[in-house]
Protein backbone atom coordinates (compact mmCIF):
# COMPACT_ATOMS: atom_id res chain seq x y z
CA UNK A 1 0.00 0.00 0.00
CA UNK A 2 1.48 3.32 -1.01
CA UNK A 3 0.71 6.72 0.41
CA UNK A 4 -1.71 8.56 -1.80
CA UNK A 5 -1.84 11.98 -0.22
CA UNK A 6 1.01 13.37 -2.34
CA UNK A 7 -0.51 12.61 -5.72
CA UNK A 8 -0.59 16.00 -7.40
CA UNK A 9 -3.76 17.30 -8.98
CA UNK A 10 -2.69 18.94 -12.19
CA UNK A 11 -4.87 21.78 -13.30
CA UNK A 12 -3.50 22.84 -16.64
CA UNK A 13 -1.05 20.57 -18.39
CA UNK A 14 0.12 22.76 -21.28
CA UNK A 15 2.51 20.39 -22.98
CA UNK A 16 1.67 16.86 -22.10
CA UNK A 17 4.20 14.85 -24.06
CA UNK A 18 7.91 15.04 -24.69
CA UNK A 19 9.20 15.05 -21.11
CA UNK A 20 12.34 13.70 -22.76
CA UNK A 21 13.13 10.93 -20.27
CA UNK A 22 15.07 9.09 -22.95
CA UNK A 23 17.81 6.51 -22.43
CA UNK A 24 19.37 7.45 -19.08
CA UNK A 25 21.51 10.50 -18.67
CA UNK A 26 24.94 8.91 -18.85
CA UNK A 27 27.80 10.07 -21.00
CA UNK A 28 28.62 13.62 -21.95
CA UNK A 29 26.24 16.25 -20.59
CA UNK A 30 24.02 17.96 -23.16
CA UNK A 31 25.38 21.10 -24.76
CA UNK A 32 23.29 24.01 -23.51
CA UNK A 33 21.81 26.41 -26.02
CA UNK A 34 21.50 30.13 -25.38
CA UNK A 35 17.78 30.06 -26.00
CA UNK A 36 15.98 26.85 -25.30
CA UNK A 37 12.73 25.64 -26.75
CA UNK A 38 9.37 26.10 -25.06
CA UNK A 39 9.58 23.60 -22.17
CA UNK A 40 6.79 21.36 -20.96
CA UNK A 41 4.96 23.16 -18.17
CA UNK A 42 1.89 22.99 -15.97
CA UNK A 43 0.03 25.22 -13.57
CA UNK A 44 -1.01 24.19 -10.09
CA UNK A 45 -3.14 25.65 -7.35
CA UNK A 46 -1.76 26.58 -3.92
CA UNK A 47 -1.15 23.43 -1.88
CA UNK A 48 -0.78 21.23 -4.93
CA UNK A 49 2.48 19.67 -6.07
CA UNK A 50 3.99 19.75 -9.54
CA UNK A 51 3.52 16.68 -11.71
CA UNK A 52 6.36 14.16 -11.75
CA UNK A 53 9.33 15.40 -13.78
CA UNK A 54 8.55 19.09 -13.20
CA UNK A 55 9.50 21.64 -10.58
CA UNK A 56 7.86 24.89 -9.48
CA UNK A 57 9.75 27.79 -11.02
CA UNK A 58 7.26 30.55 -10.22
CA UNK A 59 4.28 30.42 -7.87
CA UNK A 60 1.83 28.02 -9.44
CA UNK A 61 3.96 27.36 -12.52
CA UNK A 62 5.77 24.04 -13.02
CA UNK A 63 8.34 23.41 -15.74
CA UNK A 64 10.24 20.30 -16.86
CA UNK A 65 14.00 20.73 -17.35
CA UNK A 66 15.21 20.79 -20.95
CA UNK A 67 17.55 17.85 -20.36
CA UNK A 68 16.81 14.51 -18.80
CA UNK A 69 17.49 15.01 -15.10
CA UNK A 70 20.24 12.90 -13.51
CA UNK A 71 19.21 10.19 -11.08
CA UNK A 72 19.81 10.80 -7.38
CA UNK A 73 22.82 8.52 -7.76
CA UNK A 74 24.42 10.58 -10.50
CA UNK A 75 23.70 14.10 -9.25
CA UNK A 76 26.83 15.07 -7.28
CA UNK A 77 26.98 18.84 -7.11
CA UNK A 78 30.27 20.39 -6.04
CA UNK A 79 29.80 22.93 -3.27
CA UNK A 80 31.34 26.31 -4.03
CA UNK A 81 31.13 27.36 -0.39
CA UNK A 82 34.45 28.62 0.88
CA UNK A 83 34.55 28.29 4.65
CA UNK A 84 36.76 27.10 7.49
CA UNK A 85 37.58 23.40 7.57
CA UNK A 86 38.73 21.75 10.81
CA UNK A 87 39.28 18.05 10.37
CA UNK A 88 39.56 16.23 13.69
CA UNK A 89 41.39 12.93 13.20
CA UNK A 90 41.73 12.38 16.95
CA UNK A 91 39.17 13.15 19.64
CA UNK A 92 40.05 15.97 22.03
CA UNK A 93 39.60 13.74 25.11
CA UNK A 94 39.86 9.96 25.57
CA UNK A 95 36.79 8.12 24.33
CA UNK A 96 34.91 5.03 25.48
CA UNK A 97 33.18 3.45 22.48
CA UNK A 98 30.35 1.72 24.31
CA UNK A 99 28.83 0.27 21.14
CA UNK A 100 31.14 -1.84 19.00
CA UNK A 101 31.03 -5.34 17.59
CA UNK A 102 34.77 -5.64 17.20
CA UNK A 103 37.03 -7.30 19.71
CA UNK A 104 40.73 -8.07 19.58
CA UNK A 105 42.23 -11.31 18.28
CA UNK A 106 45.84 -12.41 18.35
CA UNK A 107 46.15 -11.27 14.73
CA UNK A 108 44.38 -7.93 15.11
CA UNK A 109 45.16 -6.58 18.56
CA UNK A 110 48.30 -4.56 17.79
CA UNK A 111 46.73 -3.02 14.68
CA UNK A 112 43.52 -2.28 16.62
CA UNK A 113 45.36 -0.56 19.45
CA UNK A 114 47.36 1.54 16.99
CA UNK A 115 44.15 2.58 15.22
CA UNK A 116 42.38 3.36 18.51
CA UNK A 117 45.35 5.45 19.63
CA UNK A 118 45.21 7.37 16.37
CA UNK A 119 41.52 8.19 16.84
CA UNK A 120 41.67 8.86 20.57
CA UNK A 121 39.53 5.85 21.54
CA UNK A 122 40.71 4.57 24.92
CA UNK A 123 38.30 1.63 25.40
CA UNK A 124 36.44 -0.39 22.77
CA UNK A 125 33.45 -2.37 24.04
CA UNK A 126 32.48 -5.45 22.04
CA UNK A 127 28.77 -5.91 22.63
CA UNK A 128 28.39 -9.26 20.88
CA UNK A 129 30.64 -11.98 22.23
CA UNK A 130 27.62 -14.32 22.36
CA UNK A 131 25.13 -15.71 24.86
CA UNK A 132 27.29 -18.67 25.81
CA UNK A 133 29.20 -17.92 29.03
CA UNK A 134 32.11 -20.03 27.76
CA UNK A 135 32.42 -17.75 24.71
CA UNK A 136 32.32 -14.67 26.93
CA UNK A 137 35.05 -16.18 29.08
CA UNK A 138 37.27 -16.81 26.05
CA UNK A 139 36.92 -13.17 24.97
CA UNK A 140 37.61 -11.81 28.45
CA UNK A 141 40.51 -14.17 29.14
CA UNK A 142 42.16 -13.16 25.88
CA UNK A 143 41.86 -9.46 26.76
CA UNK A 144 43.15 -9.97 30.31
CA UNK A 145 46.15 -11.97 29.14
CA UNK A 146 47.01 -9.50 26.38
CA UNK A 147 49.37 -6.55 26.59
CA UNK A 148 46.37 -4.20 26.50
CA UNK A 149 43.96 -5.40 29.19
CA UNK A 150 42.51 -1.91 29.76
CA UNK A 151 41.64 -1.18 26.14
CA UNK A 152 38.81 -3.66 25.62
CA UNK A 153 35.69 -4.88 27.38
CA UNK A 154 32.75 -7.14 26.48
CA UNK A 155 29.05 -7.24 27.23
CA UNK A 156 26.96 -10.43 27.31
CA UNK A 157 23.94 -11.48 25.25
CA UNK A 158 20.72 -13.40 25.87
CA UNK A 159 18.83 -15.63 23.43
CA UNK A 160 15.26 -14.29 23.40
CA UNK A 161 13.50 -16.90 21.32
CA UNK A 162 11.54 -19.21 23.57
CA UNK A 163 10.88 -16.66 26.30
CA UNK A 164 8.05 -17.70 28.57
CA UNK A 165 8.76 -21.39 28.01
CA UNK A 166 9.63 -23.85 30.74
CA UNK A 167 13.10 -23.16 32.11
CA UNK A 168 13.86 -20.26 29.71
CA UNK A 169 14.16 -17.57 32.37
CA UNK A 170 16.19 -19.78 34.73
CA UNK A 171 18.72 -20.63 32.03
CA UNK A 172 18.94 -17.05 30.70
CA UNK A 173 19.53 -15.69 34.21
CA UNK A 174 22.09 -18.39 35.08
CA UNK A 175 24.00 -17.80 31.82
CA UNK A 176 23.96 -14.05 32.34
CA UNK A 177 25.25 -14.42 35.90
CA UNK A 178 28.01 -16.72 34.66
CA UNK A 179 28.97 -14.32 31.87
CA UNK A 180 29.24 -11.45 34.33
CA UNK A 181 31.28 -13.61 36.69
CA UNK A 182 33.62 -14.28 33.76
CA UNK A 183 34.02 -10.55 33.19
CA UNK A 184 31.17 -9.24 31.00
CA UNK A 185 30.30 -5.70 32.12
CA UNK A 186 26.81 -5.30 30.66
CA UNK A 187 24.00 -6.86 28.65
CA UNK A 188 23.46 -6.02 24.97
CA UNK A 189 20.07 -6.49 23.34
CA UNK A 190 19.85 -6.48 19.57
CA UNK A 191 16.88 -5.32 17.52
CA UNK A 192 15.58 -8.83 17.02
CA UNK A 193 13.88 -8.38 20.41
CA UNK A 194 10.73 -6.63 19.28
CA UNK A 195 11.11 -7.24 15.57
CA UNK A 196 11.57 -10.99 15.22
CA UNK A 197 12.09 -12.93 18.46
CA UNK A 198 9.21 -15.28 19.31
CA UNK A 199 7.75 -16.46 22.55
CA UNK A 200 7.76 -20.15 23.37
CA UNK A 201 4.08 -20.37 22.41
CA UNK A 202 4.53 -18.55 19.08
CA UNK A 203 3.64 -14.84 19.14
CA UNK A 204 6.11 -11.99 18.73
CA UNK A 205 8.02 -11.33 21.95
CA UNK A 206 7.18 -7.77 22.92
CA UNK A 207 9.91 -5.62 24.44
CA UNK A 208 7.69 -4.96 27.46
CA UNK A 209 6.69 -8.61 27.95
CA UNK A 210 6.54 -9.34 31.70
CA UNK A 211 8.33 -12.65 31.09
CA UNK A 212 11.52 -10.62 30.67
CA UNK A 213 11.32 -9.05 34.13
CA UNK A 214 13.70 -11.58 35.65
CA UNK A 215 16.38 -10.48 33.16
CA UNK A 216 15.97 -6.80 34.06
CA UNK A 217 16.00 -7.65 37.79
CA UNK A 218 19.19 -9.65 37.33
CA UNK A 219 20.95 -6.73 35.63
CA UNK A 220 19.92 -4.39 38.45
CA UNK A 221 21.14 -6.88 41.06
CA UNK A 222 24.47 -7.40 39.24
CA UNK A 223 24.85 -3.63 38.81
CA UNK A 224 25.39 -3.86 35.04
CA UNK A 225 23.82 -1.64 32.37
CA UNK A 226 21.58 -2.91 29.59
CA UNK A 227 22.24 -1.43 26.15
CA UNK A 228 19.18 -1.98 24.03
CA UNK A 229 18.69 -1.51 20.30
CA UNK A 230 14.97 -1.34 19.57
CA UNK A 231 13.36 -0.60 16.20
CA UNK A 232 15.23 1.12 13.37
CA UNK A 233 15.23 4.63 11.89
CA UNK A 234 11.65 5.86 11.64
CA UNK A 235 11.50 5.81 7.84
CA UNK A 236 12.38 2.12 7.73
CA UNK A 237 8.79 1.62 8.88
CA UNK A 238 7.27 3.90 6.24
CA UNK A 239 6.16 3.11 2.68
CA UNK A 240 9.01 3.07 0.18
CA UNK A 241 7.81 6.02 -1.88
CA UNK A 242 9.55 9.15 -3.13
CA UNK A 243 8.74 11.06 0.06
CA UNK A 244 10.76 8.62 2.18
CA UNK A 245 14.01 10.32 3.25
CA UNK A 246 15.73 6.90 3.40
CA UNK A 247 14.47 5.80 -0.04
CA UNK A 248 17.92 5.01 -1.43
CA UNK A 249 19.02 3.06 1.62
CA UNK A 250 15.82 1.02 1.61
CA UNK A 251 16.19 0.39 -2.10
CA UNK A 252 19.74 -0.85 -1.51
CA UNK A 253 19.09 -3.00 1.57
CA UNK A 254 15.90 -5.11 1.37
CA UNK A 255 16.32 -6.44 4.90
CA UNK A 256 15.91 -2.92 6.31
CA UNK A 257 12.32 -2.59 5.05
CA UNK A 258 10.04 -2.93 8.01
CA UNK A 259 6.88 -1.57 6.39
CA UNK A 260 5.09 -4.86 6.13
CA UNK A 261 1.62 -6.07 6.98
CA UNK A 262 1.55 -7.79 10.33
CA UNK A 263 4.86 -6.27 11.45
CA UNK A 264 5.10 -3.98 14.46
CA UNK A 265 5.20 -0.28 13.65
CA UNK A 266 7.82 2.22 14.76
CA UNK A 267 5.37 3.56 17.35
CA UNK A 268 4.59 0.04 18.61
CA UNK A 269 8.25 -0.72 19.26
CA UNK A 270 9.14 2.67 20.74
CA UNK A 271 6.12 2.43 23.02
CA UNK A 272 6.92 -1.09 24.21
CA UNK A 273 10.52 -0.19 24.98
CA UNK A 274 9.69 3.05 26.75
CA UNK A 275 7.05 1.33 28.90
CA UNK A 276 9.62 -1.32 29.78
CA UNK A 277 12.10 1.41 30.80
CA UNK A 278 9.49 2.97 33.08
CA UNK A 279 8.39 -0.35 34.59
CA UNK A 280 11.96 -1.27 35.66
CA UNK A 281 13.32 1.85 37.35
CA UNK A 282 16.08 -0.02 39.23
CA UNK A 283 17.69 -1.23 35.98
CA UNK A 284 20.06 1.12 34.09
CA UNK A 285 19.38 1.25 30.34
CA UNK A 286 21.40 2.69 27.48
CA UNK A 287 19.17 3.47 24.50
CA UNK A 288 21.33 2.50 21.52
CA UNK A 289 21.21 4.79 18.48
CA UNK A 290 19.65 7.52 20.65
CA UNK A 291 16.61 5.24 20.98
CA UNK A 292 15.89 6.44 17.42
CA UNK A 293 14.78 9.77 18.79
CA UNK A 294 17.67 11.68 17.16
CA UNK A 295 15.20 13.08 14.62
CA UNK A 296 12.80 14.08 17.40
CA UNK A 297 14.73 15.63 20.26
CA UNK A 298 11.52 16.62 21.99
CA UNK A 299 10.63 12.95 22.32
CA UNK A 300 14.18 12.19 23.48
CA UNK A 301 13.87 14.86 26.17
CA UNK A 302 10.48 13.53 27.28
CA UNK A 303 11.93 10.02 27.63
CA UNK A 304 14.92 11.22 29.66
CA UNK A 305 12.69 13.38 31.87
CA UNK A 306 10.32 10.49 32.49
CA UNK A 307 12.96 7.79 33.06
CA UNK A 308 15.99 8.72 35.20
CA UNK A 309 17.30 5.16 34.67
CA UNK A 310 17.84 5.79 30.92
CA UNK A 311 20.78 7.29 29.03
CA UNK A 312 21.21 7.53 25.26
CA UNK A 313 24.07 6.57 22.97
CA UNK A 314 24.89 8.21 19.64
CA UNK A 315 25.94 5.35 17.33
CA UNK A 316 25.00 5.66 13.67
CA UNK A 317 22.65 8.64 14.09
CA UNK A 318 25.24 11.39 13.66
CA UNK A 319 23.36 12.63 10.60
CA UNK A 320 20.45 13.63 12.83
CA UNK A 321 22.59 15.80 15.13
CA UNK A 322 24.58 17.27 12.25
CA UNK A 323 21.47 18.49 10.44
CA UNK A 324 20.14 20.40 13.48
CA UNK A 325 23.34 21.60 15.17
CA UNK A 326 21.71 24.34 17.25
CA UNK A 327 18.95 22.18 18.73
CA UNK A 328 21.37 19.27 19.15
CA UNK A 329 23.88 21.50 20.93
CA UNK A 330 21.21 22.76 23.32
CA UNK A 331 20.07 19.19 23.95
CA UNK A 332 23.59 17.90 24.60
CA UNK A 333 24.23 20.73 27.04
CA UNK A 334 20.95 20.26 28.88
CA UNK A 335 21.27 16.47 29.02
CA UNK A 336 25.07 16.34 29.27
CA UNK A 337 24.94 13.64 31.97
CA UNK A 338 22.68 11.38 29.88
CA UNK A 339 24.60 10.85 26.61
CA UNK A 340 27.30 8.26 25.81
CA UNK A 341 29.51 7.79 22.78
CA UNK A 342 29.13 4.71 20.59
CA UNK A 343 29.97 4.06 16.96
CA UNK A 344 28.60 0.57 16.12
CA UNK A 345 30.39 -0.34 12.85
CA UNK A 346 34.15 -0.28 13.45
CA UNK A 347 35.64 1.89 10.70
CA UNK A 348 38.62 4.07 11.65
CA UNK A 349 37.97 6.53 8.83
CA UNK A 350 34.42 7.21 10.10
CA UNK A 351 35.06 8.15 13.76
CA UNK A 352 36.56 11.55 12.81
CA UNK A 353 33.19 12.64 11.43
CA UNK A 354 31.81 12.34 14.97
CA UNK A 355 34.67 14.36 16.43
CA UNK A 356 34.15 17.04 13.78
CA UNK A 357 30.41 17.33 14.42
CA UNK A 358 30.82 17.37 18.21
CA UNK A 359 33.94 19.52 18.52
CA UNK A 360 33.92 22.07 15.70
CA UNK A 361 31.67 24.81 14.35
CA UNK A 362 32.35 23.75 10.74
CA UNK A 363 29.47 24.15 8.33
CA UNK A 364 27.98 22.28 5.41
CA UNK A 365 30.19 19.21 5.17
CA UNK A 366 29.55 15.71 3.93
CA UNK A 367 28.54 12.71 5.98
CA UNK A 368 30.43 9.48 5.37
CA UNK A 369 27.64 7.58 3.70
CA UNK A 370 25.68 9.16 0.88
CA UNK A 371 22.80 6.76 1.13
CA UNK A 372 22.16 7.55 4.80
CA UNK A 373 21.69 11.24 4.47
CA UNK A 374 20.73 13.49 1.59
CA UNK A 375 21.94 16.48 3.52
CA UNK A 376 25.07 18.12 4.86
CA UNK A 377 26.36 18.19 8.43
CA UNK A 378 27.18 21.13 10.69
CA UNK A 379 29.34 21.18 13.80
CA UNK A 380 27.85 21.48 17.28
CA UNK A 381 30.89 23.14 18.88
CA UNK A 382 30.29 21.44 22.25
CA UNK A 383 32.00 22.79 25.39
CA UNK A 384 34.92 20.75 26.73
CA UNK A 385 33.08 19.66 29.86
CA UNK A 386 30.22 18.27 27.75
CA UNK A 387 32.67 16.50 25.45
CA UNK A 388 34.35 14.83 28.43
CA UNK A 389 31.03 13.59 29.75
CA UNK A 390 29.87 12.27 26.38
CA UNK A 391 33.24 10.75 25.53
CA UNK A 392 33.98 8.96 28.81
CA UNK A 393 32.68 10.34 32.11
CA UNK A 394 29.10 9.17 31.66
CA UNK A 395 30.20 5.76 30.42
CA UNK A 396 32.46 5.23 33.47
CA UNK A 397 29.49 5.96 35.73
CA UNK A 398 26.90 3.89 33.85
CA UNK A 399 29.20 0.89 33.29
CA UNK A 400 31.34 0.53 36.44
CA UNK A 401 33.11 -2.48 34.92
CA UNK A 402 34.96 -0.19 32.50
CA UNK A 403 38.62 0.51 33.31
CA UNK A 404 38.31 3.54 35.56
CA UNK A 405 41.94 4.62 35.22
CA UNK A 406 43.66 6.48 32.42
CA UNK A 407 41.14 9.27 31.98
CA UNK A 408 41.54 12.96 32.88
CA UNK A 409 39.51 13.96 35.93
ZN1 LIG B 1 25.28 -2.44 17.02
Image (cartoon, helix red, strand yellow):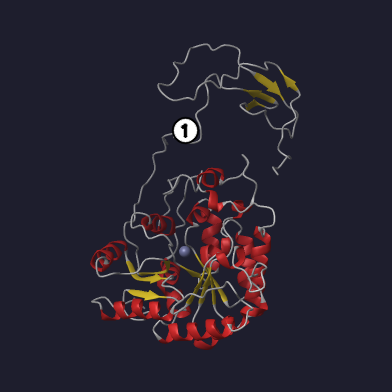
Q: Residue at x 44, y 34 (%)?
A: 77
In the depicted view, which residue is nearer to us: 361 or 117? 117
In the depicted view, which residue is nearer to us: 141 or 377? 141
Relative to residue 164, is residue 6 depicted above or below? Answer: above
Residue 27, by quadrant, is top left
Relative to residue 257, is residue 161 depicted above or below? Answer: below
Give the percent coordinates (x, y) of residue 356. Answer: 39, 55
Residue 247, by quadrant, is top right
Q: 10 Å neighbourhood of mark 1: few (<14), some, or many (≥20)?
A: few
Question: Which element type, helix, strand or loop, lies under badge 1?
Answer: loop
In the depicted view, which residue is nearer to us: 248 or 362? 248
Quadrant for the C terminus in the image: bottom left
Give the percent coordinates (x, y) of residue 168. Answer: 58, 81
Q: Residue at x 54, y 64 (%)?
A: 290
Residue 52, by quadrant, is top right
**Mark 1 highlights which residue?**
75
Give the percent coordinates (x, y) of residue 284. Answer: 55, 79
Q: How many marks?
A: 1
Report if residue 223 is visible in the image: no
Give the percent coordinates (x, y) of residue 130. Answer: 44, 73
Q: Residue at x 69, y 57 (%)?
A: 262
Q: Is residue 284 left or right of residue 381?
A: right
Report if residue 258 is visible in the image: yes
Q: Residue at x 68, y 63 (%)?
A: 268
Relative to residue 401, is residue 192 depicted above or below? Answer: above
Relative to residue 376, is residue 337 depicted above or below? Answer: below
Q: Is residue 207 left or right of residue 66?
A: right
Amino acid sequence: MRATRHVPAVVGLCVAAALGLSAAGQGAPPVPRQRGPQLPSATIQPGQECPAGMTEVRPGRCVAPEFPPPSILDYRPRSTLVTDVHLVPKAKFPVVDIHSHTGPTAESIERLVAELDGMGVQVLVNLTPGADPAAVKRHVDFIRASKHPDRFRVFANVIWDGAGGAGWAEKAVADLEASVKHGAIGLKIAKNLGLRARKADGPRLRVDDPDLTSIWDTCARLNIPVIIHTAEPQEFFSPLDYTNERWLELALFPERRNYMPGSPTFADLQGERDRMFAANPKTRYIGAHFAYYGNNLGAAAALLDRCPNVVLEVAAVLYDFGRQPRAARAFFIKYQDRILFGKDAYAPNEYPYYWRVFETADEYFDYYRDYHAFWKLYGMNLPDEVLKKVYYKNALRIAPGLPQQGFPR
